[in-house]
């Protein structure tokens, strides 16, 4: 399911969103291993980022 969700551009994300501490869509957080949905390492020409999402956003 998570693979079908479109991620925002990393340039539009906050530092906390880039490192997976806050939801990549709604900025809910802080997220942890029990509350986050890991969206996988994303690679860009500028480097890697680690988006995660809250359960509410991935369920919507």
Image (spheres, helix red, strand yellow):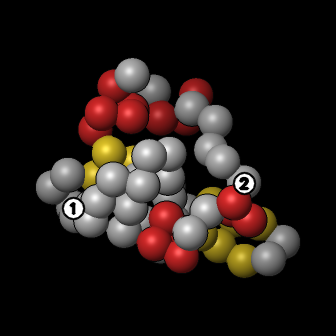
Q: Residue at x 33, y 53 (%)?
A: 28
Q: Where is the C terminus found, in terms of image quarters?
A: top left
Residue 29 in percent (x, y) is at: 29, 60
Is residue 27 among what the camera can see? yes
Q: CA distance from mark 2 to mark 1?
A: 23 Å
Ranked by sequence position, the earlier of labels 2 and 1 is 2
Q: Which residue is mark 1?
A: 33
Which of the two residues, 37 or 23, is positioned nearer the viewer here?
Answer: 23
Q: What secondary structure is found at the residue carrying circle 2?
A: loop
* Of labels 2 and 1, the one closer to you: 2
Horizontal relation, residue 42 to residue 28: left or right: right
Closer-to-camera residue (54/48)? 54
At 61% from the left and 62% from the top, the residue drawn is 13
Q: Residue at x 72, y 54 (%)?
A: 9
| View extreme (right): residue | 45
Q: How many marks?
A: 2
Q: Residue 15: x and y, percent? A: 54, 76
Mark 2 neighbour density, 10 Å: few (under 14) some (14–19) many (20 or more): few
Displayed quadrant of residue 16 = bottom left
- Furthest toward the top, the residue is 60
In the rendering, at what x and y percent does residue 2 appear?
47, 35
> Relative to residue 22, is residue 9 drawn left or right?
right
Q: What residue would you read off at disc 2?
A: 9
Using the rendered view, name the quadrant where residue 7 is placed. Answer: top right
Q: Which element is circle 1 on?
A: loop
Say if residue 38 shows up in the picture. Answer: no
Q: Is residue 10 left or right of residue 16?
A: right
Indicate the position of residue 1 as horizontal and vertical percent values.
Answer: 45, 27
């Amino acid at each position: 399911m998570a693979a079908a969700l479109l991620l925002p551009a990393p340039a539009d994300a906050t530092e906390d969103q880039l490192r997976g501490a806050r939801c990549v869509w709604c900025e809910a957080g802080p997220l942890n291993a029990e509350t986050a949905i890991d969206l996988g390492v994303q690679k860009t020409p500028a480097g890697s980022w680690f988006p995660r999402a809250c359960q509410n956003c991935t369920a919507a």
